[in-house]
Image (cartoon, rainbow, N blue to C red):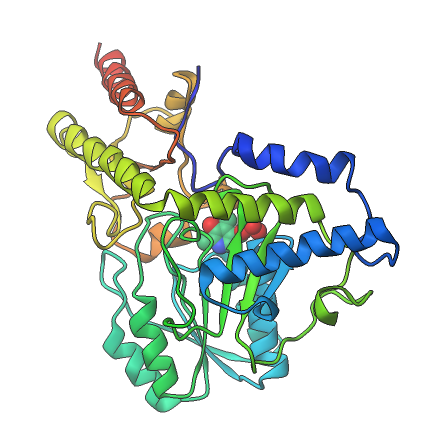
Amino acid sequence: MRIYLDNAATTPIDTEVFNAMTPYLLNHFGNPSSLHQQGREARKAIEDCRANIADLLNASPQEIIFTSGGTEADNTAIFSAVYSEGVKHVITTRFEHHAVLHTLEALHAKGIITVSFIKHDDKGVLDIAHLVELLQVSPRSLVSVMHANNEIGNLNDIEVIGELCERYNALFHTDTVQTMGHYRHDLQKLKIHFLAASAHKFHGPKGVGFLFCRKGVKLSQLIHGGGQEGRLRAGTENIHGIIGLTKALQIAYKNINQHQQHIQSLKTYMIERLMSEVPGVIFNGNSANINGSLYTVLNVGLPSVGYSRGLLECFDEHGISVSGGSACSAGAASHVLQAIATDVTKDNIRFSFSKLNTRAEIDQVIDALNNIYQTIAA
Ligand code: PLP
């Protein structure tokens, strides 16, 4: 059996989620826009999902727009701020996903926006005083700061950032793709205008996610066509995906504390074993700081094996799936690791955990690592 420790790239779908989806592929196949009974049933299923998600996040159903995933939700948020809300300046970080950074680069290249980056220390911790300075200079900006980074796991304080945005009349977009279903988001309490989420990061299906857009904030339509999603996002709804997304989020919320405790204990155990058995190991970013990082991600700089294949391939040969960084940029140098102080002589590996991982698997990974080092030393 392979060991899967690449859950920040994607998670396996929950059987319960899969079982909830299949009737919507096989039997309830109606088009939600059709006026007959099968269409009306499909429409009701989608609207029930919207209400259930809104309920979990303490939002209202009209504030939830279903999308094809996190990338579309991020793009829609940024385009809305720029084209509908008239934002001309965006404050962001060097650590955002490319769904944000490449969108900003494209708008900047066309001369539509200017972009400022919040300063950070060598662990990637943001300098909030610098954010205040930027907001003082350009109050009506869009602030786009992710809740947690997908490569090094750094957690940003979206409660504090939201308060600052409110004080300076800025709009706040946060990418919660890595934290949705792992932390509770109370959207009455958090001063967020746009939030992006994706089902496949919390044991739901791929190709579906949602954007939260706060009531009163104007959305810009990215995909034109039919009148779906309140005329905000055209295209026949991915009904089985939306059912799966909702079921996955309900399961995640129901067991959130228990899963956090379990996954956190695996991460802590792995840190302990690496520190005691691998001389020269380092932890990238704020990854090993329990309170400052996502409990599902551990980014480690390991002594290099010294030949071209690298540790990633060695792990793969041992039946262990891990990653060198973001799956979307596989093969390219990580913009996240480049932005912080990393040791370039090390092999940087991201281990990312889920509720399905076990302590025995962590033991097998450390044993495999010891075995890899022993083989090259021999
Ligand atoms: N934002 C973050 C932080 C991510 O980790 C990812 C996926 O890796 C995305 C956005 C993109 O989400 P999706 O794959 O649903 O388009």
Extreme residue toward the right, this view = 36
Say whether residue 62 is left or right of residue 12: right
Position of the N terminus, as image quadrant, is top left
Q: On the image, which quarter does residue 116 sit in?
A: bottom left
Say whether residue 294 is left or right of residue 206: left
Extreme residue toward the front, this view = 37
- The x and y percentages for residue 312 are 39, 28
Q: Is residue 208 above or below residue 225?
A: above
Q: Is residue 111 above or below residue 202?
A: below
Q: Is residue 62 above or below residue 329?
A: below
The total of numbered circles placed on residues is 0
Q: Residue at x 58, y 84 (%)?
A: 85
Front-lying residue, 53 or 157: 53
Q: Is residue 49 above or below residue 59?
A: above
Q: Residue at x 38, y 36 (%)?
A: 354
Q: On the image, which quarter does residue 63 sit in?
A: bottom right
- The x and y percentages for residue 233 are 71, 65
Say whether residue 144 is left or right of residue 211: left
- The x and y percentages for residue 303 are 23, 31
Extreme residue toward the left, this view = 276
- The x and y percentages for residue 323 are 41, 35
Q: Residue at x 41, y 72 (%)?
A: 188
